[in-house]
Amino acid sequence: MVSNNQSSCPKCGGQLKYYDSVKRIVRTKRRATKKVIIRRLKCTGCGCLHRELPSFLLPYKQYETEVILGVIEGLISSETLGFEDYPCEMTMIRWRTSLKLQALL
């Protein structure tokens, strides 16, 4: 995963070139979902493919960063209006206890 406007490979430092695009479903508050286009970039050095994620997405997560941060900071719970059953309580517990995710933030 690379951030927007990054032009070098995080593995080898080679130049990244546009390869193709993929659609990704993003889950937001109040059960809304939207599709976003994610660019894939290929390293000219090692040949690895990297996805260019916008700031409102985290790697390997379907939910917006705003929703995940709200859960971790305790602003969103299963009783919060608009979030009653979405995301589920087990997902929220996993986010709160995940040291790996907190290190990303």
Image (tube, helix red, strand yellow):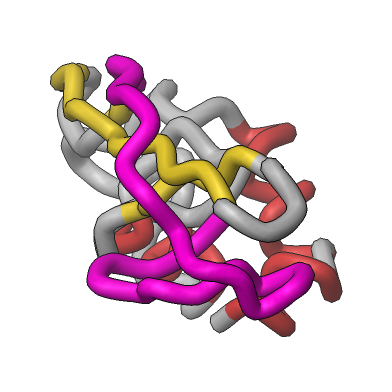
- 32 relative position to 104: left or right: left
Instruction: Give whichever of 34, 21 is nearer the camera.
Output: 21
User: Residue shown at 77%/48% (left/top)?
Assistant: 94
- 40 relative position to 99: left or right: left
96 to 57, vertically: above or below: below
* Number of numbered discs visible in the structure rendering: 0
User: Residue shown at 18%/18% (left/top)?
Assistant: 35
Assess whether residue 67 is covered by the magenta stretch: no
Q: Which quadrant is home to the N terminus?
A: bottom right
Query: Residue 91: x percent and y percent?
Result: 66, 36
Instruction: Give whichever of 86, 24 is nearer the camera.
Output: 24
Query: Residue 60: x percent and y percent?
Result: 62, 40
20 to 99, vertically: above or below: above
Range of residues picked out in magenta: 1-24
Instruction: Give whichever of 98, 46 is nearer the camera.
Output: 46
94 to 56, vertically: above or below: above
User: Residue shown at 20%/41% (left/top)?
Assistant: 81
Query: Residue 88: x percent and y percent?
Result: 56, 27
User: Residue shown at 37%/50% (left/top)?
Assistant: 17
- 56 relative position to 60: left or right: left
Query: Residue 62: x percent and y percent?
Result: 46, 32
Q: Which quadrant is home to the C terminus?
A: bottom right
65 to 6, vertically: above or below: above
Assess whether residue 14 is covered by the magenta stretch: yes
Pick out the residue farthest to the front.
45
The quadrant in which residue 45 appears is bottom right
